[in-house]
Amino acid sequence: MRYAAGVDAATAALARELGRLIAGRGWVLLSGGRPSGVMQASVTGAREAGGLTVGVLYGDDRDDAADGLDLVIPTGLG
């Protein structure tokens, strides 16, 4: 899986594992919801573990959301 250019593989792996751990505890992963970097990696990990994922977007376009989000909240705040 590709992440943003500014996120190295080790950071992405840690974010993905954190997402798995959050879901493993039955918690909800709340993220910035963008399809890049630690946001996408944590969502991916949580989804792999069967967790609920929520992304809050600063824009108003749901298509800007990370893959695997269960709930997308576009705020339109820019």
Image: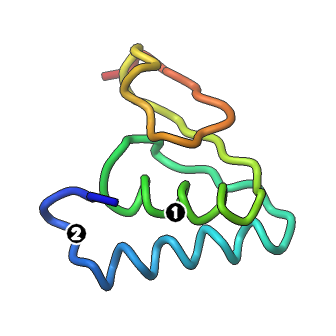
From the image, which quarter does the N terminus lie in?
Answer: bottom left
In the figure, 53 relative to 29: above or below? above
Q: Report the number of numbered marks.
A: 2
Residue 7's disc is: 2
N-term mark: 1 or 2: 2
From the image, which quarter does the C terminus lie in?
Answer: top left
Left or right, 23 with respect to 8, comes to: right
x 21%, y 56%: residue: 4
Mark 2 residue type: Val
Q: Can you identify the residue that label 1 sits on?
A: 42
x 33%, y 79%: residue: 11
Q: Are marks 1 and 2 in contact (CB under 8 Å)?
A: no
Left or right, 42 with respect to 39, comes to: right
Q: Position of residue 21 (x, y in %)?
A: 69, 77
Left or right, 67 with respect to 12, comes to: right
x 49%, y 20%: residue: 75
State the SS at label 2. Answer: loop
In the figure, 10 relative to 41: above or below? below
In the figure, 41 relative to 22: above or below? above
**Which residue, as the protein is rendered here, is positioned at the far left?**
5
Residue 54's disc is: none
Q: Position of residue 73 (x, y in %)?
A: 58, 25
Q: Quadrant of residue 2?
A: bottom left
What colour-coding does the image apply?
rainbow
State the SS at label 1. Answer: helix
x 56%, y 78%: residue: 17
Mark 1 residue type: Ser
Q: Position of residue 8 (x, y in %)?
A: 21, 76
